[in-house]
Amino acid sequence: MKSAFVLALVAITFTACGTRAPCTAATCNGCCDTSGACQAGTATNACGTKGTNCSVCAGGCIGGSCAVANPGGDAGSTMDAGTTCQPSTEAPTGRSDLGGVFDPMSGELVVFGGDPGVAVNCQSMPNFSEETWFYDPGCNTWRLSGEQGPSPRNRHATAYDSMRRRMIVFGGRWRMGSSGNYTTYNDTHALQFGVAGAPGHSWQELQTSGTRPPPLSNSAAVYDPMGDRFIIFGGNTSDNGGTFAPNGKVYALSFSNNTWSEVVPTSGTIPARLFHAMALDAKRNRLVVFGGGDQNAFLGPFFNDVYTFDLATRVWAPLTLTGTPPVARIRPAMVADGERDRLLVFGGHDDGALGETNDLWAIDLMANRWQRLRTGDTLLTAGAGFCDFPSNFTTPDLMSPERREGVVLVPAGAGSFLMFGGRSDCGTVNDVWKLNAAMGTWETLKPAFSGLSCQRSGKTNCTKLCF
């Protein structure tokens, strides 16, 4: 059964520090290990600021410094020594179709824009945010930026420019009112973070030249540290909310001169798509694309294929994987787990009877195989029709987040990943979760205000999934 909320992919980002010799502050955004290689500077055995020697931190690394237990925060949280947490109750409302990154220097999750719209009678009512929020895991608090950023939008693509310590935002869409065509963007903005972990930050629209991508929503992006460029692939070129026109091209914005160019393949093809996930396999210098849909992405069938694009040879090729793959889906989250040489895939909306999903998968890049890390919720009682889900629709995995699509999932150092937001069968959510990559386990950092099924919300005497 298809959910009413078949929306677009939130782009998933991955950051990596390229290995360059010699390892110095000029060539490495992280720290230098004993072999002289550049490391991300956020793992427990690779903690340090630009160009410094990596330190070993038993408690993990926040902002380039060894972290200590935070007596005022949640169990297991960390913060810089000497930092004082200020109590705060503010938080973003539930939203999907947003973008976000993790800034290792400040140790914060940063999210921008998105769709905070609340569905009416199971019909999506798209809305558009221009808010920028900062989440501090150590203090477990949110704060809203007062800086003027890009215009309100959702379905934009984001990535973390680790060379300059900034979040890059491309494209997205906006509409006045609840009907009519959308305005789709192809502008590029940068959120520059404060110097040396300071809280100050500023937005700037980048003035670019060259062959810009067409206006796009639902594209996916990464930052390529070896080429020092922002790369996007796919997306929707249609301004009409009732039709999809998928894009199949790759574009790159070189930060050496802020010039866009189309990256034309030398061989191989990939079906044009939107609602897909993409990550950078830095070890092999290639893009990896999973899932999504084409012009039929309202109802499917969707994709569960995996393709690679070699950034050196510009060759598209299907990636043949052993093991049972996930059910085809749109709007999953995918992020690189470089420490274990794999990609992690979470959630999305499948084209089977379940719809929204919360399963967790890994693509082992060394063995070229799929591995299911968590099954998530399983179907128990089929729905009776459109938006007619019984209260016992699933057997829930209460140790996993609510089933959802369109989330932000980013690497947060010390083998952990942070996830925020998304859209479930019951609305938009604003919870924050931490994923322990080694264990494949989830931990709730901030509970959701809304969007939870009855089985998770604590409501009683429910006759339907959400009420």
Image (spheres, rainbow, N blue to C red):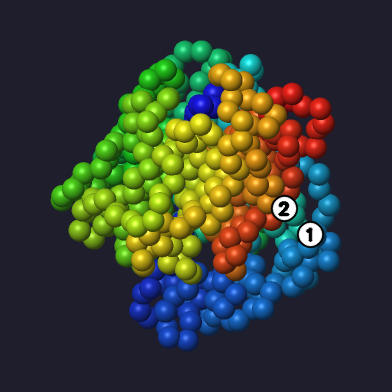
Confirm or deny contact between disc 1 and disc 2 (CB under 8 A): yes
Give the tally of numbered discs. 2
Q: Nearer the viewer, residue 213 or 56?
A: 56
- Residue 340 place in picture, x, y as percent: 47, 68
Q: Nearer the viewer, residue 27 or 246?
A: 246
- Residue 367 place in picture, x, y as percent: 36, 66
> In the shown orientation, is residue 364 left or right of residue 428?
left
> In the shown orientation, is residue 178 left or right of residue 218?
right
For the C terminus, the quadrant is: top right
> In the shown orientation, is residue 235 left or right of residue 93?
left
User: Residue at (35%, 61%) from the top-left corner?
Assistant: 368
Callout 1 amino acid: Asp
The extreme top residue here reads 179
- Residue 416 place in picture, x, y as percent: 59, 62
| Residue at the spot of label 1 | 74
The Cα–Cα distance between marks 1 and 2, rounded to whole angstroms, is 7 Å
In the displayed structure, 167 sits above or below 336; it is: above
Callout 2 amino acid: Leu
Q: Nearer the viewer, residue 45 or 151?
A: 45
